[in-house]
Image: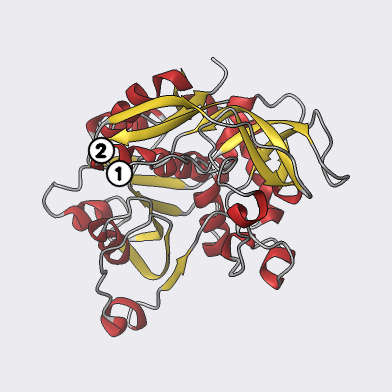
Amino acid sequence: MKKAVISGEREATLVDAPEPKARGDYALVKVHSAPLCTEYKAYVAGQRGEFLGHEAVGEVVAIDEPGSVSVGDRVVVMPLYPCGTCALCRTGDYIYCEHNQDFEAIHGSREGTATLAQYLLKPAWLLMAIPEGVSYEHAGLACCAFGPSFGAFDRVRLAADETVLITGAGPVGLGALVNAKFIGARALVVEPFPWRRGKAMELGAQAVFDPAQDDLVARIKENTASNGVDVALDCSGTVAGQRTCLEAVRRLGRVAFVGECSEELRIRVSPDLIRNGLTVAGSWHYNARLFPGVMRVIQESPLVDSLISHVLPLAEIRQAFDLCAAGKTAKVIMKPWE
């Protein structure tokens, strides 16, 4: 099979790899669409990678034992390799599993873990059925395009007629904007890249801000009768974005973090949280019970097509990474068989 690899700084290409085989409850999935996420960061940094990606949709083409899927099923591939038996997995919060399976120990190699490839392996219970009439490209939005913000908005109970601030308008933040609009909320967006600020306006943001402008929090509050937003969601994965969320939300407001960040965020518990009465949540992906709700957005939102900015053959992986690094994309879908 063909798969994408990062071979050096701004160097990415396709290589041949052994086709993985279905084994036990692991089904073989032919990947029809593989959305990009943050893989471009390793590409820019020159971090070599042979097993790229964590988002995919496709068709079950082989199974080793009877289970919850059959050959021919169209499926969304959920991330990671959780155990499937702990309390978190059984209640749908498998993303937080503390006992992930050792894929290499089970299969003898890591081939089959990459999603930027023509085939992958996944436990059958992590393959979610794509509803009839939903294309592979649209179904791919059920992973990191809509998933993180859908789960976060569920956690903080974003409601219609509320105002939500979204910091960071990459694919995750733009997906959050579409989710917010679907709920009926009013959305304000902070984003440094001009292309993505324009895309946020196209998708219906009430106002869009450049984080470099002076008095950012005050400008945001001007759009909320100076009270602050009801909900703030950081999708930027930056300390600046996280601080903006904490400072721009109203008293008794709710804040959720979905953007990954390794830098230290200084939170002053009393002035930041206690005196403002804030509810703060970290959220990673979404509970399995929410999958039908994610699919409802995909099936019913008029903004879904606009969230996909590029559909490219996997052979153009280098060009795709360059576009992502330049901040000139919404969600990019790679096609391994084109």
Element under label 2? helix
- Asked if residue 329 is positioned above or below residue 233 in the image, the reply reads above
Q: Residue tagged by mark 2?
A: 44
Image quadrant in which you'd find residue 139: top right
Regarding residue 183, the answer to whether it shows in the image is yes
Element under label 1? loop
Q: Amino acid at mark 2?
A: Val
Residue at the image point whose x is 72% and y is 61% from the top: 84
Q: Nearer the viewer, mark 2 or mark 1?
A: 1
Going by the picture, which residue comes out furthest to the left? 214
Q: Residue tagged by mark 1?
A: 47
Mark 2–mark 1 Cα distance, whole angstroms, equals 8 Å
Quadrant of the image containing the N terminus: top right
Q: Residues within 10 Å of mark 1 (few under 14, many from 20)?
A: some
| Marking on residue 102 | none
Residue at the image point whose x is 58% and y is 27% from the top: 118
Image quadrant in which you'd find residue 172: top left
Residue 19 at x, y = what percent?
A: 63, 31
Front-most of residues 105 and 118: 105
Residue 13 at x, y = what percent?
A: 38, 25
Q: Amino acid at mark 1?
A: Gln
Residue 155 horizontal side relative to residue 106, left or right: left
Going by the picture, which residue comes out furthest to the front? 108
Residue 68 at x, y = what percent?
A: 83, 46
